[in-house]
Image (spheres, grey):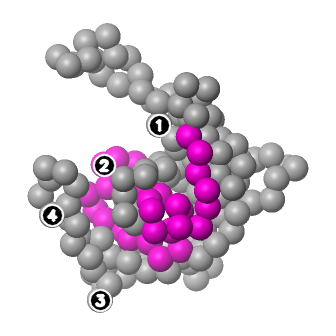
Amino acid sequence: MRFRYSILPAEPDAAFPNRRSIKRPLLPVLLEKDGKAIVGPAMIDSGADYCVFPASIGTALGIAMPNPNGYVFSRTGDPPHIAYFDTINVTIWNGDSAQQPFRFELYAGFCDSLDHVGFGVLGQEGLFSRFQVQLYYQQNYFDIF
């Protein structure tokens, strides 16, 4: 299944004074649990060990936080964060009626430090462990199959 990179606005800074935008491998995901559903973007991240979404999405799905499935992690140079994991159902689809959506159960984390980011992260365990992912940055698309 093919997706286009998203072009997001980006502020210039000292390191990148000419930057006005940045490309990200974002795709829409439908997340469901116990009859509740929410659609939002998620970014493919080969450097992420797990799939993690903003806590606000977990709250909308009725996931208890805190829960016994807490996991402490840190990103490079950041203080530790805690994600609370639970099993949800995920659908990935590019909107092409000729394509069948990918539907699968996912053990995902929900973390309040991602609320300001506005999208989830699809990492090694959960996305890359299930699907082959190919990024074509210069051609401005990526494939999942």
Task: Report, in whole angstroms, how far the alpha carbon at label 2 lies from the one at label 4.
Answer: 16 Å
Task: Report, in whole angstroms, how far the alpha carbon at label 4 lies from the one at label 3.
Answer: 18 Å
* Camera-side residue of 92 and 38: 92
Q: Please tell me how crowded label 4 is: few (under 14), some (14-19), or many (20+) other residues with Cα within 10 Å.
A: few
The reply to whether callout 2 and callout 1 are in contact (CB within 8 Å) is no
Residue at the image point whose x is 47% and y is 30% from the top: 23
Task: Report, in whole angstroms, how far the alpha carbon at label 3 lies from the one at label 2.
Answer: 24 Å
- In the image, residue 128 lies in the stretch drawn in magenta: yes
The numbered mark, 1 or 4, whose residue comes first in the sequence reads: 1
Residue at the image point whose x is 26% and y is 17% from the top: 16
Q: Disc 2 residue type?
A: His
Q: Disc 1 residue type?
A: Arg
Q: Disc 3 residue type?
A: Pro
- Relative placement, left or right, of 11 versus 102 is left
Range shown magenta: 106-135
Residue 61: tell me if it is visible: yes
Percent x, y of residue 75: 22, 55
Q: Disc 4 residue type?
A: Pro
1 or 3: mark nearer the eye: 1
The numbered mark, 1 or 3, whose residue comes first in the sequence reads: 1
Residue topped by disc 2: 116
* Camera-side residue of 142 and 40: 142
Judged from the image, the secondary structure of the residue bearing numbered disc 4 is: loop
Residue topped by disc 4: 80
Look at the picture and state if 57 lies above or below 118.
below
Percent x, y of residue 100: 80, 59
